């Protein structure tokens, strides 16, 4: 099913603050990945009629990998848990309720866990779909060539695949029992290498 692409973002103080945080602390390739994750997920939701909290999903998308950054990388806590806790702090500082802040934390943690259904948790489902597509090319049939070209033209990959795999290798070295380590031993490197988003010419029939 084609993904309706729209370069629109929520316009709230929390959304603007999340973009400012991600822009300051994420390297350019990781920042673009975070923005693409929002766009892929929002387009997927429109294509499938999935209702979701736009601001909550946007903030969670922008902060979901902040635990991989030099400033917020934990030597003991898995990166998604460190990022989730930071998102909780962010939400509380933005004036969100403890419950809404906890939802952002949950979405970020769950994106590295077993798949969840949209009916159970739409924002976590969208982040799982979007990140698995952007990182390792899963569900290519959901993202046709025109949507890929539009997103990548505005938010290019900038060597994201290699940078991301290096970050996961480092997580594995320091935290061998974490979800990132399971991804590495499960062959994420090969999936990243085969990602159609990094092909010079994306297949038009995917």
Image (spheres, grey):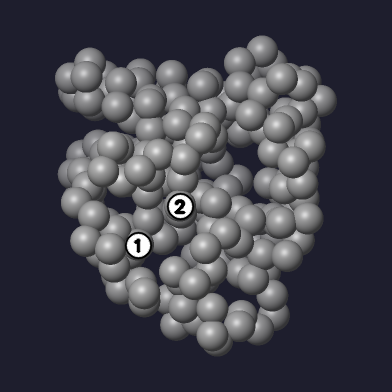
Q: Split into 4 quadrants, where in the image is the N terminus?
A: bottom left
Please give the count of numbered marks on the rendered protein.
2
Please tell me whether residue 203 is drawn above or below residue 115 in the rendered image: below
Q: Extreme bottom residue here?
A: 204
Q: Residues within 10 Å of mark 2 (few under 14, many from 20)?
A: many
> Looking at the picture, how far across and down is residue 168, in whole percent?
72, 37
Q: CA distance from mark 1 to mark 2?
A: 8 Å
Residue 45 picture quarter:
bottom left
> Looking at the picture, how far across and down is residue 43, in whole percent?
33, 64
Please tell me whether residue 159 is drawn above or below residue 112 in the rendered image: below
Residue identified by numbered label 2 = 129
**Residue 14 or residue 194, whichever sits in front:** 194
> SS for tag 1?
helix
From where the camera sits, is residue 138 visible?
A: yes
Residue identified by numbered label 1 = 44
> Looking at the picture, how far across and down is residue 105, in whole percent?
38, 25
Disc assigned to residue 144: none
Please tell me whether residue 194 is drawn above or below residue 50 in the rendered image: below
**Residue 113 or residue 32, whichever sits in front:** 113
Residue 98 picture quarter:
top left
The residue positioned 30% from the left and 37% from the top of the image is 121
> Looking at the picture, how far across and down is residue 19, in whole percent?
37, 44
The residue positioned 76% from the left and 61% from the top of the image is 193
> SS for tag 2?
helix
Residues at discs 1 and 2 in contact (Cβ within 8 Å): yes
Q: Extreme right residue here?
A: 173
From where the camera sits, is residue 73 visible?
A: no
The residue positioned 74% from the left and 41% from the top of the image is 186
Q: Residues within 10 Å of mark 1 (few under 14, many from 20)?
A: many
Q: Split into 4 quadrants, where in the image is the C terminus?
A: bottom right
| Label 1 or label 2, whichever comes before in sequence order | 1
């Amino acid at each position: 099913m084609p993904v309706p692409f729209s370069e629109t973002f929520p316009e709230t103080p929390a959304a603007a603050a999340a973009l400012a945080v991600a822009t300051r602390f994420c390297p350019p390739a990781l920042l673009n990945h975070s923005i693409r994750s929002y766009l892929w997920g929002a387009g997927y939701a429109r294509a499938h009629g999935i209702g979701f909290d736009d601001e909550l999903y946007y903030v969670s998308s922008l902060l979901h990998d902040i635990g991989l950054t030099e400033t917020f990388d934990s030597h003991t806590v898995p990166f998604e848990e460190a990022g989730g806790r930071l998102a909780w702090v962010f939400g509380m500082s933005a004036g969100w309720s403890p419950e809404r802040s906890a939802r952002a934390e949950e979405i970020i943690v769950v994106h590295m866990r077993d798949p969840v259904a949209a009916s159970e948790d739409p924002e976590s489902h969208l982040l799982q779909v979007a990140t698995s597509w952007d990182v390792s090319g899963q569900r290519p049939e959901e993202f046709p060539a025109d949507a890929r070209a539009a997103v990548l033209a505005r938010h290019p990959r900038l060597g994201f695949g290699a940078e991301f795999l290096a970050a996961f290798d480092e997580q594995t070295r320091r935290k061998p029992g974490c979800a990132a380590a399971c991804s590495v031993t499960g062959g994420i490197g090969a999936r990243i290498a085969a990602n159609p988003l990094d092909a010079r010419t994306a297949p038009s029939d995917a």
